[in-house]
Amino acid sequence: MSLRSVWIVSLPGRTIGKVLFSKYFGTVERRAKIFDGEFYTSIPDHNAFYEALTSELGVTLNPLNKGSTRDSCGNIGQKPVFELTLKNNKKLWPLLVVEQYGVLFCCLPLVEDGCGSKPPLVKITGLSVGFSLLLGMADCIGPLNQPLAETSVKLAELHGYLHQAAPFGTPTMISPHVVKGTLLSRSTTSQSGQKHPAWKPVSHRGKSQLYLAITEQIRAVQYDRQDTPDAYTLTGSAVCKAELDGLIQDVSVNLQQRKDGVPLDHLVVHPFVSISDSQSIYSTDSPPSSRRLRFTPPLEMFTLCHYTVTSLPHLPIKGFYQMKLKDKDSVELLIQLKLMDNIKASFEYCELQIPFFNRGPMVHCDSTPSCGTTLMSPDKTILVWNIGHKFPSKSNEASLKASVKFGQPNVQAIKEETFCTGQNSYAQIYFKLVDYTGSGVQIDPKSVQVSPQTKHKLTIVQELVAADYKIWNSHGDALSGFSPIQNSA
């Protein structure tokens, strides 16, 4: 899992294209000579590397290459891994290239089986490690307000980062936050004499805080048709950010479900997390229970677990959408929304949008919403209904009637969509419910324990976000997908 070399390259455009930074690992290179044998290709100089890289990416034309290798039908693309052709017809492979902040981050992993046989990429462990290191280098540099230059202070700091993150070309700890903490700390031991672990080189200084958040995303499509069932998927994740006094703390939390919660189909936990109970939270044989998670948190925010749900009893917002053509240039529409009765939480935002494709801009809209307000987008192609933070408390229902007239279409400004013509139309809802989860998963504040015990501020966030929530017009056709029929024979 070692790397022969890393580069940072700027492309021609805002600046002159060239190699801005490179780091060569001599000990790994000697191993590459042994492993590759007669197929060994030495690391080229900056000019040769830049010419070969830009030619392979199609940025510049290399007369030696002439595009025959890159554009050949027999060439199997394996991006972001590339094979460079040098002037001596030698091949530099496998080169990993990642674009971040307008520059290219490149690395050449060591192939321990030798490059002559070209083993499958999945067997080259240095690729995944190199990819993580390149992203760590990009995070270390951060967003750039101006083009990166060879004399930039960020590049000077990168040498210290690589010295700590990848000693002798072997990545060990790539998190920029942890590496910078190691570089700034004067001692590797705490006041009590305990040695700092490598993944937590310094102790937190300041007020102790513990942040836990459950975020769920729901994707749903509603058709209002007997022959087409509604479709949905719900995914969730729990994250933690721990800023606690002391060297090493153990944190335990209960991941439990409401009485009306549903079983989880999959629960994948972070390697930092251990599960200290034996009862399954995603078992369908028993009612939803709790799952106790125990972990030793790092300094940075990390994801405790991921899960999915495919058996929701109902969608949080049930919708009904009808649009009819009055004539060629006008339509009438009706939208009815029903918020489920068990949802008592409020919205951070709730907005419905109706895009109009293959039509002219809206010139007139007469709308009657039962709550909230309506407006037109700046380009007059989307009708927006801002519902607000809550549905009417008595009925939990909201409706919108509108009559829309369109002007003459502008060929340059028209929004094209091959399917959404005539009465084929949909409405899309964007919302975020706070202090609520669709699956019923929640964190019990009383279950949170920190050992050794320390006084801290506890913040728990739970939210449900609509990632893609559509309602198709019941008077038109709709896009839908069906699972293939299983052959019982």
Image (cartoon, rainbow, N blue to C red):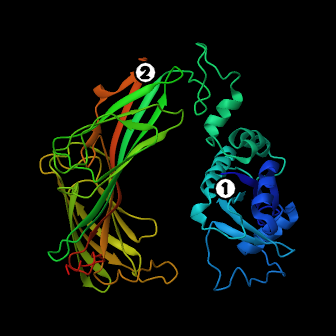
Q: Position of residue 20 (x, y in %)?
A: 81, 55
Where does the C terminus fall, quadrant-wise? bottom left
Q: Position of residue 458 (x, y in %)?
A: 39, 27
Front-lying residue, 476 or 132: 132
Of helix, strand and loop, which one carries label 2? Answer: loop
Please name the amino acid that badge 1 sits on: Tyr
Q: Is residue 347 above or below residue 82?
A: above
Q: Earlier in the sequence, mark 1 or mark 2?
A: 1
Of helix, strand and loop, which one carries label 1? Answer: loop
> Dot 1, crowdedness within 10 Å: few (<14), some or many (≥20)?
some
Q: Which mark is residue 338?
A: none
Q: Which residue is mark 1?
A: 101
Q: Which residue is mark 2?
A: 456
Q: For residue 353, what is the image quadrant?
A: bottom left
Residue drawn at x 28%, y 39% is: 442
Front-lying residue, 326 or 391: 391
> Dot 2, crowdedness within 10 Å: few (<14), some or many (≥20)?
some
Q: Position of residue 50 (x, y in %)?
A: 81, 65
Q: For residue 74, what is the image quadrant?
A: bottom right
How many tags in the picture? 2
Please name the amino acid that badge 2 sits on: His
